[in-house]
Image (cartoon, helix red, strand yellow):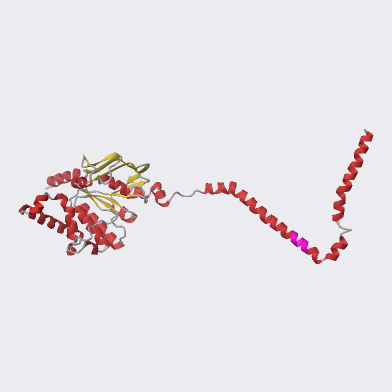
Amino acid sequence: MTTTTTKADATAEPAARETVLDARGVTMRFGGLTAVRDVNLTVNAGEIVGLIGPNGAGKTTFFNCLTGLYVPTEGEVRYKGQVLPPKSFKVTAAGIARTFQNIRLFNNMTVLENVLVGRHTRTKEGLWSALLRGPGFKRAEAASEKRAMELLEFVGLAEKAQHLSKNLPYGEQRKLEIARALASDPGLILLDEPTAGMNPQETRAAEELIFAIRDMGIAVLVIEHDMRFIFNLCDRVAVLVQGQKLIEGDSQTVQSDERVIAAYLGEPIEEAPKDGPAKTDAPAETEAEAEAPADEAGADEVDEADEAPADDEAPADDDAPAGGTPAEDDTPADAADAAKDAAPGKENDA
């Protein structure tokens, strides 16, 4: 019994560590704009990996490179050791499925029909079989419908299989999109903001659903802006900032990194630069502003001085002959005359 258990554990361990996704040096340029620059990322089987970053960091562009919607300018994407072809339907056939940031359902089709569309990749019946509707086609159709109903049961939508998808609540539309992605039997599913617009109860249900998908043996790569959700969910988290991978690690490592905090909250404003401009630029303005009040104050004093004598005109006239003003005016003139008289005297003495 002990030997059997040990062997089973030993067999399961390598499978759990198998690298499902290996993105190497992925770079995506649009003309002169580099949206993704030299990003490396791996996802192992049975693992949930998060991809976070500010708006415009290049997360969805990176997803599009992984799923064949974009052909990377540089780098390569491998799924279980095989380089993926740059075609989205071939990527799906290889074993990678995805959901989108904006829900993309067939609104006028039923919930069941939407899931059957995702199942089409795994059916082998061709055009003629569909037209002739032979026994083989009917068996394949019945098998697909059975699998689709199992997936709807898995996400909790089996009772609404015949409802139009456009009539579902927002949270259930998200679940339906996940069920459609799972219909292709992927080994890796990429979820682009699966809880966007959800209330806390719906977010919690989505978290439990993703854990259940992981327990099915499907690796998960998820983009999300809800930090509490992503850190509770993921085994590893990678951070993209301006198209580059800033850091990758467990939740605690990423949360405590100062660069991640700065990327989300902005660079802290240092106090030293504040004092610098205050010492250089402020004095010019301060002096200019200081001169203006001084002039205004002087003008006010002059006005008050002018107004004061106006009220006492008689004393001002009486004091004028005895005041210092005429003396002060005459003094420079007398000094000038004395200087003129002294100058010739010196010349005569010389």
Q: Quadrant of the C terminus?
A: top right
User: For the magenta stretch, what is the residue range?
Assistant: 302-307
**Picture coordinates of residue 211, whole percent (x, y):** 23, 54
Say if residue 347 shows up in the picture: yes
The answer to which of 283 and 112 lies nearer the viewer is: 112
Which residue shows up at 56% across the image and 47% down it?
277
Farthest residue toward the left?
135
Q: In this view, does 140 lie to the left or right of 87?
A: left
**Picture coordinates of residue 176, whole percent (x, y):** 22, 58
**Picture coordinates of residue 78, whole percent (x, y):** 23, 41
Decide whether residue 39 is among the magenta residues.
Answer: no
Decide whether residue 304 is among the magenta residues.
Answer: yes
**Picture coordinates of residue 205, whole percent (x, y):** 26, 60
Q: Is residue 67 left or right of residue 314?
A: left
The answer to which of 345 and 204 lies nearer the viewer is: 345
Farthest residue toward the bottom?
311
The answer to which of 256 and 74 lies nearer the viewer is: 74
Examine the rendered structure and indicate whether residue 262 appears above or below residue 314.
above
Name which quarter of the figure residue 227 lies in: bottom left
Say if residue 250 shows up in the picture: no
Which residue shows up at 27% across the image and 53% down it?
100
Which residue shows up at 84% across the image and 62% down it?
316
Q: In this view, does 81 lie to the left or right of 263?
A: left
Q: How many marks overall?
A: 0
Is most of the magenta stretch helix, strand or loop?
Answer: helix
